[in-house]
Amino acid sequence: MYPAIGELRRWSMPALEQYANVDVQVGPRLFEQVPQQMRTDLWASLVRRSAAGQDCVMRYPALQAQNVDKKTCGEIEKDVPRTFPDVPGFNDPLGQRRLVRILRSYSLLDPEVGYCQGMNFVAGLILKYLKSEAEAFGAFCVLMGDRNYRELFLPHMRFLHLRMSQLEQATPPEIAARLRDCQITAALYAPQWFLSCFANEMPTTFSARIIDALLQAPPDVTASEVLMKVALRVLIKLQPRICGGSASSGENFEFVLKSVRQVPKSWGAAELRALLSAAFLDSLPFRITRELVPPPPLQHMTTPSAASATTTARSPVQQRSHSMGNAAAALAPERGFSQRGAKQAAAAATTTTPYSLLDSDVMERLLGSKK
């Protein structure tokens, strides 16, 4: 299986987490070091402008009154305490219960997906800025539905496998060759990036700016596309570390994998800011291929009996666990990796909307705050 996402964020968060001011992406413009309230106003405005977001906001109270199956409840209750334990608002029972309610409600709204590890970081990050549970739930649903983020969380994990394969294909040849020589597949690092919107391994300010871009993206841009662009920029920035070693060996496997997983955590605010700006401007020297598969309509009101029927044979959590257990082994031979690489993988296992779509008062604040 892949490494448990909740187990990876044990390092001490950098001071970026405690900044009073943050970078906010509005359209193609970056507003540096503005009050956090600016992001709150931006996200709330975007949820109000989304029909799906508003629909989910209205349905949120009724969803909370419904029962959730025990397996899903158990997974959510296990993961929530491990979500940003060092960030204020998530290390207390009150904040954790708010996150639990949002995740339970989404599992009812979209029973095909249910709950998957990684959603807790994305929903938790949204809650960090949107204090209204209903609005936070609406923003989360916009990401999952309008941006088709849900494809990565489907129980069969087929689209997650596909996006990892595309990430490997789009990686610059020198980096790809080095990773292949070290028998490191994308399954060893990409799931933690993709399923948590980088919030599990990067400062929350970094991930929040990705969500800025996703919430403003036009209909033909998916979450997977934006996340792959960011992932490619991370790999490009790591090229000196990845390609700086000698011939392949077990030591090189450990060194390169540790570089990919650990070095980005040491990057400063300026480096992270420049990385995202490059990714959003799509200045990559190669084209990312993707398949756009529109998500089916979300279940507007799922009754407890209907929710139970979806888990008769195997619940989404069980299906996903089964799929992830075989993901790396299935992916490695397909991409030309050896059996050793497959076993290691299995074991380890922005385009934006015009300003006119935003509320005028929000834009006045944002434009007035730019230095």
Image: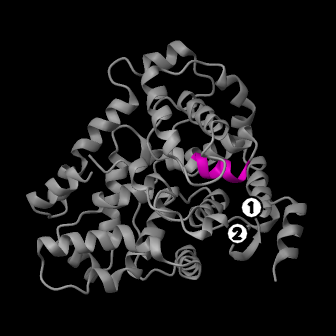
Report the magenta residues as a range: 123-130
> Which residue does the numbered mark 1 point to in the structure image?
39
Q: Is 223 or 271 nearer to us in this picture?
A: 271
Q: Secondary structure at mark 2?
A: strand
Contact, mark 2 vs mark 1 (Cβ under 8 Å): yes
The answer to whether any part of residue 80 appears in the image is: yes
Q: Quadrant of residue 301?
A: top right
Q: Residue 145 at what x, y percent from top left?
A: 57, 44
Mark 2 → mark 1, Cα distance in angstroms: 6 Å
Residue type marked 1: Arg
**Closer to the N terminus: mark 2 or mark 1?**
2
**Place of residue 104 in the rendered image (x, y in percent of width and height, measured from the top left):** 56, 30
Amino acid marked by disc 2: Val
Left of 323 or right of it: where is 286? right
Is 124 magenta? The answer is yes
Local packing at callout 1 (Cα closer than 10 Å; few below 14, some 14-19, many 20+) is many
SS assignment for the magenta stretch, majority: helix
The image shows residue 70 at horizontal and vertical percentages of: 45, 21
